[in-house]
Image (cartoon, rainbow, N blue to C red):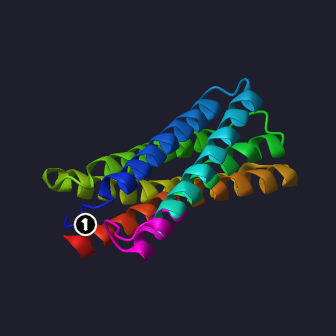
Amino acid sequence: MKFSKKKEDEFFVMFKDFSTTLVEMADSFKSIIHDYNNVERTIAGLKLSESECDVKSHKVIEQLNKSFITPFDREDIFAIIDQLDDLADFIEDSASKLIMYDIHEIKPDAIEMADIIYDAVDKINTLFNTITDKKKLKESKEAIIEVNRLENLGDAVYRRALTKLFRESQDPMDVIKWKDIYEELEETLDACEHLADTVEGVIMKYA
């Protein structure tokens, strides 16, 4: 990628730091889903991480505003940090809804979607750790393809989950709660795909 070298490290270090935090958040969420104990404490930790992501986002924007030369177009940098922040919000919101709806038992489809979310976020992290290295361009592209595959897989689980919910649940409130939770999980995967697609567009622009 033919990025401008001036300030390149500064912005990409910020992106890598942000994506590392996202992996930690996705891992915490996955642990909540798999071992549904001490949920409030873990979710409190996720809220702190999401707040830290807000700070990281503001720092990138502040740096962007005072930088004369940027590694690539300002609008692309803003789009990436905005979508990174959105992804942090979706992960935290997905966890918080478990408390908000007073969920006592996790459905198997939610467990599967949490696993897919973790895998997608992990590939996002791979993407930001390979994007500036021409020797790792193939790895970057493979990460983008994998995020898209995982989003498609998540869509299939989401549709299956809703079908089972509407067919099997006898409690209208259960349907309302879980429909919203499944939608939040699906939107989290959408956010992963949107971010990967945005980065892919940057790669193509500067290849």
Residue at 69% from the left image edge and 50% from the top image edge:
93
Between residue 84 and residue 181, name the one nearer to us: 84
In the rendered image, is residue 190 in sight? no
Q: Amino acid at mark 1?
A: Ser
Q: At numbered mark 1, what does the secondary structure look like: helix, strand or loop?
A: loop
- Image quadrant containing the N terminus: bottom left
Compared to residue 47, the image places residue 184 above or below, namely: below
* Residue 100: % across, % down: 82, 45
Q: Is residue 27 left or right of residue 124?
A: right
Counting labels gives 1
* Residue 50: % across, % down: 64, 46
- Start-end of magenta stretch: 65-83
Q: Is residue 53 magenta?
A: no
* Residue 34: % across, % down: 60, 30
Residue at 69% from the left image edge and 28% from the top image edge:
36
In the rendered image, is residue 43 in sight? yes
Between residue 171 and residue 154, name the one nearer to us: 154
Q: Is residue 94 left or right of residue 81?
A: right
Residue labelled with disc 1: 4
Compared to residue 136, the image places residue 201 above or below, namely: below
Q: Is residue 96 left or right of residue 31?
A: right
- Image quadrant containing the C terminus: bottom left
Between residue 101 and residue 198, name the one nearer to us: 198
* Residue 40: % across, % down: 77, 31
